[in-house]
Image (tube, helix red, strand yellow):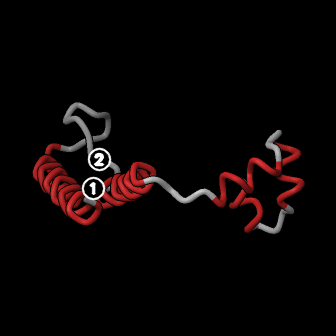
Amino acid sequence: MIDRLADAGIPIDRCCRVLGVARQHYYRVKRKPMTQSELRRQWLTGLIREVHVASRGTFGPDDSPGRSGDDCSSDNDCADNIDQASCEFDDAWH
């Protein structure tokens, strides 16, 4: 969040003070390299967002409000895409 505010032109010192974060801690965390699990979590979050957009926000259980029966086949396609992408990620990072 601090990075986004700083990108918008708000000084990091001010962001840290307002959010109650020690400036030293912010910089220590920022310098620390991401772990493999953090990279995977970030990648999966992006993939989930892509699938959600690609399915027009309908990816989920069939009884979700606002779903039409026509989207059932796209759910299977989306699930297959997630499985395939997850395997590709595992191969790349192991």
As rendered, which of 15 and 52 lies closer to the eye?
A: 15
Quarter of the image holding residue 81? Answer: bottom left
Q: Amino acid type of disc 1?
A: Ser
Circle 2 Cα neighbour tier, 10 Å, few/some/many (<14 / 14–19 / ≥20) = many
Residue located beneath label 1 in the image: 55
Q: Is residue 15 left or right of residue 88?
A: right
* In the image, residue 61 above or below residue 54: above
* In the image, residue 88 above or below residue 57: below
Q: Is residue 55 left or right of residue 28?
A: left
Q: Position of residue 25 (x, y in %)?
A: 75, 47
Q: Position of residue 35 (x, y in %)?
A: 46, 53
Q: Position of residue 50 (x, y in %)?
A: 35, 60
Q: Quadrant of the C terminus?
A: bottom left
* In the image, residue 81 above or below residue 59: below
As rendered, which of 20 and 63 lies closer to the eye?
A: 20
Q: Residue at x 23, y 57 (%)?
A: 90
Q: Residue at x 19, y 36 (%)?
A: 62
Q: Find residue 58 and name its label.
A: 2
Q: Residue at x 66, y 58 (%)?
A: 30
Pointers 2 and 1 in contact (C-beta within 8 Å): yes
Q: Position of residue 87 (x, y in %)?
A: 18, 57
Q: Is residue 77 left or right of residue 53?
A: left
Quarter of the image holding residue 7? Answer: bottom right
Residue ranking furthest to the top? 63
Q: Residue at x 31, y 40 (%)?
A: 66
